[in-house]
Image: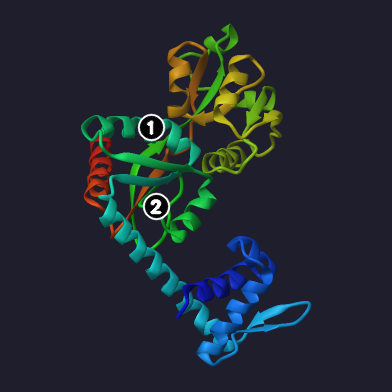
Amino acid sequence: MDFRHLEAFVSVVDEGSFSNAAARLQISQSMVTVYVRSLESELGVKLINRTTRSMELTPDGQTYYYYARQILKLNRDSMFALSRAESGERIVNIVATPYTSRYYLSGRIAEFARSHPDVGFHITVCYNSEIAPKLRAGGFQFAFSNTKIMDSEYAVSKYSSAGLVIITPNVERFRALAGKPFPTELFATERVITRSSTSALQQEFLRWVRRHLPDVKLQVAAAIDDTETIKQLVAEGIGISVLSEVAVREMVRGGKLLSFPLEGIMPQPLYFVSKKKLLSPAQVEFRDFILEAAEREE
């Protein structure tokens, strides 16, 4: 069986059309058609009913699609295992959210590298919603995520938590609030800088607003999907914001920002996702290092 034929069939189903599958595989549409027809001829069944305007899987196609994906995955895993054995596999492949990459992972890698200078890292940063598909596609042993990833091939454990705080510019009217609960009624009068995306922490903050300030409409000064820019704008007095305590710690220590606990909200768990099988010795060492560090923080 030619794996190119399987890849073409699965891509057509995943992408919803022969033309999109061709773009994904970077081959011509006519070649995709040839590959799918060759697979149908080899199997002796019709997999896809195709007209000039639409396409749909046959009952046989629906059944075979599931197994074709499994075959391709096994092939990728086997090739990955062979390449790892050939190279000695001293590379750790990680997918992480921007938050976990910047405020947690960078420090852990620096600490691990001091005792394992021969281990290299390949890190892909993406949104939470992209992590599970990237893991399914293969190539990553680990993920650091703000949300729980459910996949039988991966073990998931909590490695830290992210508490939310209100941040303000370091000016007298906010310094006067030191040691006191932050007056939540200020959210009705102060301009607020929010995220433009629906991150896990942003969603938690919006739920908090609905619970505690149901009649308040936030006066949004800016919506930006970059934590560093939000902090700079707050420091410049453009508005107040709500961010993770870890993300603002350095600017608070440096006196550029003030922070206040956001009362009535639980810290959000952060998750470490690790592949259960096909880990090299170096990757096992990194996994154990992260889990041990998580135990120390509890």
Q: Residue type at mark 2?
A: Phe
Q: Residue at x 60, y 40 (%)?
A: 206
Q: Residue furthest bottom?
A: 44
Q: In which quadrant of the rendered view does residue 209 lie?
A: top right
Colour scheme in use: rainbow
Which residue appears at 62% of the width and 20% of the height?
233
Q: Is residue 121 left or right of residue 181?
A: left
Q: Using the image as rendered, state which of residue 217 and residue 155 is in the foreground.
A: 155
Up/down of 104 relative to 10, above or below: above
Numbered disc 1: secondary structure: helix
The residue carrying mark 1 is 106
Q: Quadrant of residue 183?
A: top right
| Quadrant the C terminus occupies | top left
Q: CA distance from mark 2 to mark 1?
A: 17 Å
In the image, residue 49 lies at what x, y percent?
A: 67, 85
Q: Identify the residue shown where x is 27% and y is 33%.
A: 113
Between 283 and 166, the one nearer to me in the picture: 283
Disc on res. 140: 2
Q: State the image coordinates of residue 79 (x, y, percent, origin top left).
A: 36, 63
